[in-house]
Amino acid sequence: MPHEPQPQPADELDAEAVRTWSSLALAALGRAREDIDAINVYPVADADTGTNLYLTAESADRALAETFDSAARAAEAPTSLPEAVRAWAHGALVGARGNSGTILAQLLRGVADVLGAEPEGRQTGPGGLLAHALTRAAEEAYAAVAHPVEGTMLTVAGAAARAGEAASAAAGTAVDVARAAYDAARAALAETPGQLAALGRAGVVDAGGCGLVAVLGALWQALSGQEPAAEPVAGRPAVQPDDPCEQHEDGPAYEVIYLLEASEAAVAELRARLDGLGDSLVVVGGDGLWNVHVHVDDPGAAVEAGVVAGRPYRIRITHFGDERRRGRGERAQRAVVAVVPGEGLAGLCAEAGATTVLVRPGEVPATAELLDAVRRAHAREVVLLPGGTELRAAAATAAEQARAEGVRVAVIPTRSAVQGLAALAVHDPDGSFDEDVVAMTAAAGATRYGELAVAERQSFTSAGICQAGDVLGLIDGDVAVIGAGLTETAEAVLDRMLGSGGELVTLVLGPEVPDAVAERLQAHVQSGHLAVDTVTYRGGRYSAPLLIGVE
């Protein structure tokens, strides 16, 4: 049951006050979400800062609510302040979205580092604990950003922290500290256009800073019981560049975000490696779990760096091109979301304009992850390509939830990534939604799909008994060929698939398959089917040894 915020005057933060703060912050960001999106010009004018902050706060609020609900169900002692702030910060960490959301997650972690300490380890004094928490939050946020820039939400956080410390030094209460921090944040926000040229040219304040002001206003409201005077944002940029891509046309093409399980030493090396690959690098977290955010031209290299450092998961790769062309604050009419098993396929689909969800072998993304991808697509209409039968239930649930948010969603029952590629090839964003969905569904349905895998153990299959190490050739999901070598088995699979006709063969090679295999398979197709064309792609890390599509 949603928590109904009922702010009451308080001299200090407790668990209930934190819960109210979270609920009020989420509500404030929800009201300001579209306006913040509209003024998003830095570091990339992709109109999603408000959305990213809201989704991060939503994840944090959900984790906090679950902690309260769990304690209530177990009839345990009421949730303590340390439990509340730690759950809140953890929820923000695992659900952080974009540059601004990642920084917000680190701000909440800084708050939790102080408020989550045991009582004997806390700083005492009227308002001192809250002031110290705001200071730690600003310090950790600055430390998380590889190259801090003034005129951003970091500047706003720093101003709020200094004002809070000054109020505490004057024997102010927690309410006084919260009000001082809020007022200073609003003043700092008003100065950001003069600190950052991109903001000054557009005639706007910093979008991330706007979101932080809303969060600090919610803090003051939670403690004082008084509602902030007004939302921090209204309207759109006073100056719109002729080309929304103009300011960032030389910037990296992709945003890469993933959770990472790794040691602090490994993360230190990761920071240095990612810093050389791109910009807007933010790495937040600690205690073995991190959220990594970076803008790069080579998303595969960014993910590979995470693999070297530890175990990356919940990998999200977003291509900026389409989002920049949409203009600030305006939704695209239609977008495609594709679930793909491989970095190379993710890049390929992103270049075709799709928002991608990258999955590892055996991994099934949660409904929340698919819903997040639909939201990131930032469109009124979305075509969802799940890429596997095991994903249909999650895709259907995500589509239903997105429809409740006003997005028209159609799920095309693709059973393989090659069917998704076929659907993308005929995607017509300018045609009617229904006609586009019908054409994409027909293209996917007309594509037979094959896959080569290596048997891990002896087992019974539809083609007989296989031994560990055998190469299995699957056609439309069933084992059709058992072979000893990859190339020979692939040739046998191609012969069977082309036996019923075909005009185009698509080959997607896994990361360890040499180019010579593709050349041999292309020659094999040509020798028996002169009229059939063949295209080859690299699936990249996490893809199967070989995927085959026949259209």
Image (cartoon, rainbow, N blue to C red):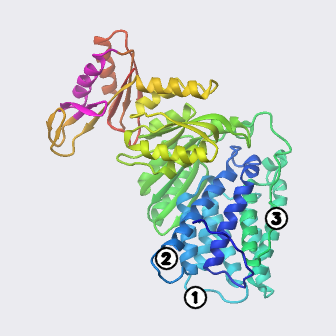
In this rendering, the answer to whether 5 lies above or below 38 is below
Mark 3 is surrounded, within 10 Å at the Cα level, by few (under 14), some (14 to 19) or many (20 or more) other residues, namely many
User: x, y (%) of residue 145?
Assistant: 63, 59
The residue sitting at 59% across, 35% down in the picture is: 335
Q: Secondary structure at mark 3?
A: helix
Residue nearest the observer in this picture, 388 or 360: 388
Mark nearer the N terminus (3 vs 1): 1
Left or right side of 227 for 71? left
Task: Give the quarter of the figure containing the C terminus.
Answer: top left
Mark nearer the N terminus (2 vs 3): 2
Residue 493 can be seen, yes or no: yes
Residue 473 inside the magenta-drawn segment:
yes
Q: Which residue lies under the disc numbered 1?
A: 119
Q: Which residue lies under the disc numbered 2?
A: 71
Image quadrant in which you'd find residue 388: top left
User: x, y (%) of residue 52?
Assistant: 64, 53
Q: Which residue lies under the disc numbered 3?
A: 186
The residue sitting at 46% across, 23% down in the picture is: 442
Image quadrant in which you'd find residue 483: top left
Q: Amino acid at mark 1?
A: Pro
Q: Amino acid at mark 2?
A: Ala
Residue nearest the observer in this picture, 354 or 76: 76
Count of labels shown? 3
Q: Secondary structure at mark 2?
A: helix
In this rendering, the answer to whether 534 lies above or below 174 is above
Q: Which residues are magenta?
A: 472-501
User: x, y (%) of residue 204?
Assistant: 82, 50
Give the CA distance from mark 1 to mark 2. 21 Å
Residue 277 can be seen, yes or no: no
Residue 345, numbered circle: none
Q: Amino acid at mark 3?
A: Arg
Closest to the camera, between mark 2 and mark 3, is 2
